[in-house]
Image (spheres, helix red, strand yellow):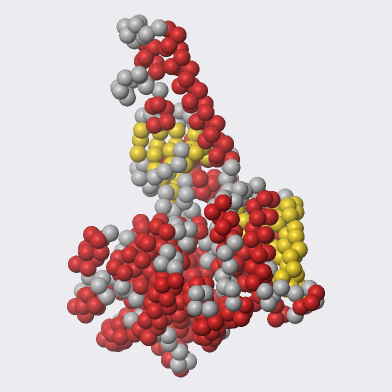
Amino acid sequence: MIYRLRDIEIDLAQFELRVDQKIVQVEPKVFDLIVYLIQHRQRLVTREELFQTVWSGREVSDTTLSNHIKSARKVLGDNGNLQQIIKTVRSRGYQFIADVEECAKAEVHTASTTLTNDSTTSVSEIAGVNRARKLPLSLSKLIILLTAIICALWFYNATKTAKELPPYLLVVPFSVSSLHNANLAPFADQITRELIQSLRKISGIKIIPPPSSFMFKDNKQRSHIREKLPEVNFVLDGVISEGRNGNIRVTVELENLQNDKLLWDGDFDIQLQSTNRFNFQSKIASSVSKSLKVIILDKERQVLKQIPTSNVQAYELYVQGQHQFSLMTHESVLASIDLFSQAIAKDNTFEAAYIAKANAYRVIMILFDQPKKVLPKVISSAIDVLEINPESAKIMSLLGIAYVHAWQWEDAWKMLTKAHDKDPTLALTELGFALYYAAIGDAKQVKQALLNAERLDPLNLEIADWGLWALLMVNEVDAAIVWGKDKVKLHHPLPYPVVNLSVAEYVAGNFERSVQLAEQGVKLSQREVFPLIILAQSYAAAGNREKALALIKEAESAQQYMCPYETAVVHVLLGEVNKAFTLFEEAVNFQSNCLIFTRNDPRLASLKNDERYNQLLTVLALDDASISRLKTAR
């Protein structure tokens, strides 16, 4: 018997688990656990039952079972946050919830058939009718022997391929030597980003993208890396210092994270006023590949030789712009846009500067200003990139998620799909899909897109934040809470994962816990506007009208842009429906991104029979007729 789900085969005869026809090594008890859950997938399986059946009644700790469940999820492409394959029912047990196909024989073993076109006749049947067909005995044995050789070769290649998993590499943000000028910090950060981008071009290496990499900027201890990214097995680290004659020296080390051994190190001197400054990156990429025994393809070598710009002044402006953007305040992001624009003026073919400018406008649109004012700038900046490089998957991805936030659904779907077709490794594309599916109410696809996004960029804070909202807005409240708790742990002590989790807790009816979390988030953020509004929601959900309204007043006194939608939710929770609809109308006028959740937001359940709510859905193209058209168009 073989069980199939997606690209996974679980072969009970061979005791094998295969992914894309490649054997994956699985501990025997993990394999038995998977099989038992599949065989009883029509019901919940208790922990006690698993102890009795899989472990034959032996005394086993809850931790052991939890670790085996974690391993089973990992090998099946699932995780504890989303639980698309193995679902945890708290304090009770587990249930296998994915669709499974049962097959009598594996396709790989059906190659041994008769010499005719009868595909249902096996080798053993050939031997049985050998005399009737008057085949020589030696020919029959030859067929059996050849079949055995083919199967053996397949098994060997599959096993060999499974063992040769690509190295998983983390490039941690390079440091500036304490003996030298701290002004080199922006340059060190940019070297890190560009090395990551260079290494991403080598198909034999799996690498952590910059958003997750920069989570280690203030803590590069190897124990910390192992805790946050247990699957990473190599680390590339570096130090920037001043060299001779005004040059910069970059010292680089490649370590094996599993045994703390140094695999390679090197020193590179960079002339800042020369375009030769970019050559060292391809040299490092080549040295890293050689150390990891990864072959660089000829076409990849050609791409590695490309430089971002031949204008040194444009590059310096771009580096300073990236530094301002990383500070992530309204003023700093605006400053970054000005610097990127100056870089473009120096070199109007500087693609990276165009992309950075478009992304900065996208962040302004989402976090700091009325989307209606900023979206045209996102679009025009993106069009500038496409004129230089019509094949840019990065800008398609960025534009696609901007269209989602602006509720331009058809344009969003087309652009995200194009981005994915050109480069399926962009986490931002998957996040865009997750938000798109959350808007139209497809919980299964939301989970799959988030699973993909998290796999591609596991510590990306934007994915962490929007992921909880996407799950919550399709009424996956338990999954949202699990996701939120995981992100709070991963991103401690940042405020927004805590604030987001507080929303899921009050939706689940845990009002006291929600207030505690929201107050913690307000304190960590130093009383920023968004956490204040979420704390107001927590108090409103708990029935404390006075405190909720006082927090709204405090948030309004800051005179900063705040999506009216979230303030409207406070009034919905307080039963002040007319006030809420006034704010919804204001949100529509601003083209606020929060409105993407209007159709399925569980916090708005009390408005479902209000005609004004249905009119709002029509304006957002989220009414039933529009949703039907969107699904048909896909």
Which residue lies at the image location 39% right of the left edge and 18% below the top edge? 123
457 or 345: nearer the viewer: 345
The tally of labels here is 0
Can you say whether 234 is above or below 144 in the image? below
Q: Is residue 477 visible?
A: no
Residue 540, by quadrant, is bottom left
Q: Is residue 71 visible?
A: yes
x%, y% of residue 375? 38, 80
Q: Quadrant of the N terminus?
A: top left
328 or 537: nearer the viewer: 328
357 or 24: nearer the viewer: 357
x%, y% of residue 601? 33, 71
In the drawing, does residue 264 fall left or right of residue 210?
Answer: right
Residue 302, by quadrant, is bottom right
Which residue lies at the image location 74% right of the left edge and 68% below the top edge? 269
575 or 339: nearer the viewer: 339
x%, y% of residue 619? 24, 77
Which residue lies at the image location 45% right of the left edge and 93% below the top edge? 559
x%, y% of residue 325? 55, 79
Residue 609, by quadrant, is bottom left
Can you say whether 134 is above or below 440 in the image? above
Can you say whether 373 is above or below 260 in the image? below
Q: Quadrant of the C terminus?
A: bottom left
Which residue lies at the image location 43% right of the left edge and 16% below the top edge? 143
